[in-house]
Amino acid sequence: MRQRAAVLCGAAVIAAGTVTAVPADASAPQPTHPASTVPAAGPHWEKCATEDYPTLQCATLKVPLDHARPRGRQITLALSRVPHTAKTYQGPLLVNPGGPGGSGLTLAGFVASSLPAKVAAQYDVIGFDPRGVGKSTPALDCLPGHFDPVRPDSLPDTPEVERANLARAESFADACGDKYADLLPYIDTVSAARDVDAIRAALGAERLNYFGYSYGTYLGAVYAKLYPERVRRLVLDSVVGPDDVWYDANLNQDLAFNDRHRAFLAWIAEHDAAYRLGTDPERVEAAWYAMRAALAKRPAGGKVGASELEDTYMPGGYYNGYWPYLAEAFAAYVNDGDTGQLVEAYDNFGAPDASGDNGYSVYTAVQCRDAAWPRDWDEWRDDSWDLYAKAPFMVWNNAWYNAPCAFWPTGSGQPADVANDDLPPVLMFQATGDAATPYEGGVGAHRLLRDSALVVEEGGGNHGITLSGNDCLDEHLAAYLTDGTVPRGDGGEADAVCPALPDPKPLESKAASTSSRGSTLHGLLGFRG
């Protein structure tokens, strides 16, 4: 859950409401309808303006740690708001960047400034840090420095390397259990969805508008299952496949990320004049894996080994706006033996920071808690080696990223059944080549949400596609937020199709710059979800 790539970026009445609480077994939370309510005070908003978002306001809200015990221990959620300015007021629009573990405070400012002004003016755009995240308290940080370089090679081609990686995963899970035994049973998607309803209630809104990216689409779908009568509008961009939560989702990602990495390498081959790595994509791919093998033996700058290289290039699978920077570093290393650009790329894209430690802690806490993971490492090993033969780019890096779930100190719940026949029209967006949430999952979610409309970006491979410079997609988004209009197709997979934006150009070209909004958005969304 790293967000280092951002370095490349270019009057409502708040009334007292009700906080919803649902009796549930803490060991296996289920999406059942709420049974009781308790009073909650409305947020007290204060200015927290930034240069980019001068009207941003911030507040906090207390919610129960355990929604089954609404008068028990309370935790605090950090909120942000860009207030509406138009006479026509359509209520709060809650935004979430995904993760799990992503901070949504700045996303509110981005969404409010990126939507057409006349549309944004009709909403209070609300951001929040979910429980455990960022400025919400308590915030999780299980094992600071877990991703500090140089880590063991992710490829466990010897028993010693496998044991080293397993020890790291187990130590992370143990540290989480030691520090947060009282919190971990309640860091999950269902609890976060109940928090969303507490925010709605505190804002005094009978119904909520919601806009989620990536994992935020799953959070939104779970919220809608719990509280269908409280959903006014629901936008889901880059949709989690609801049948894959979460072990299978990561296996499916491995195949899709390999395809996306090969698309990047083929793009380099198309621009051989700039990168001098050959015009044959297979030759370029061989050079990339040769670079990986060399760095496994001698890390660049003493900190970019094989695992760190994968961390650095994985963001290119999320957003092709990073391709020119990644290609420059790759070419400099192969052609000139220059490690400086590779270290710089790692610092920009792959290096951990404090928010990354927090985000990863929440990521593992939610994913390990939401659904059952194999506890027998042999199953992980067999599945990963089988996939590695087909898709070597990210399989083992992703396996170790999620491996703490094999040792997680709490029990696991059951994935939420998000099938829903009780919602108003829902608007969904999906790119055909999305690696983090593969296309098939978006189609599956479309089928489960009965009155949903799916807008497909044909030929696109980015993750998070609205408000990124594609006017066709954004026109559908604006129409829906204006008056609820959704496209209706002929019964096929897609209700509307938009062509993808062209791939970027090498940096020396005048056309090198990609959409600044796209760079900003992907810096806010981070990676791994």
Image (tube, rainbow, N blue to C red):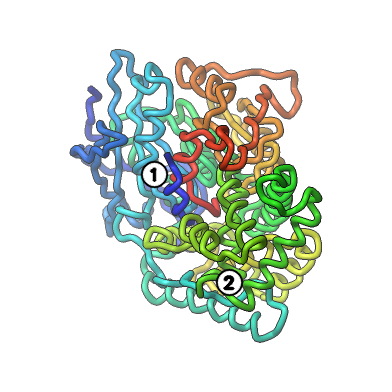
Q: Secondary structure at mark 1?
A: loop
> Residue 152, percent across and down?
58, 77
Q: Position of residue 422 (x, y in %)?
A: 56, 29
Residue at the spot x=57%, y=27% of the render?
Answer: 470
Residue density around tag 1, few if under 14, some if 14–19, many if 20 or more, within 10 Å: many
- Looking at this view, name the residue that lies furthest to the bottom: 160
Q: Crowdedness of circle 2 by 10 Å Cα count: few (<14), some, many (20+)?
A: many
Residue 473 higher or lower than 236, as above or below: above
Circle 1 is placed at which residue position? 104
Residue 7 coordinates in the image, percent (x, y):
42, 49
Alpha carbon separation for disc pair 2 and 1: 32 Å
Closer to the eye: label 2 or 1? 2
Residue 73 vertical position relative to residue 322 in the rendered view, above or below: below
Image side of residue 26 versus residue 507, left or right: left
Q: Residue at x 36, y 39 (%)?
A: 127
Q: Do we see residue 424 in this rendering?
A: yes
x and y percentages locating residue 57 in the rendered image:
24, 37
Residue nearer the viewer, 199 or 318: 318
The amino acid type found where label 1 is placed reads Gly
Q: Marks 1 and 2: in contact by CB < 8 Å?
A: no
Q: Residue at horizontal 58%, vertical 44%?
A: 319
Residue for badge 2: 305
Camera-side residue: 427 or 269?
Answer: 269
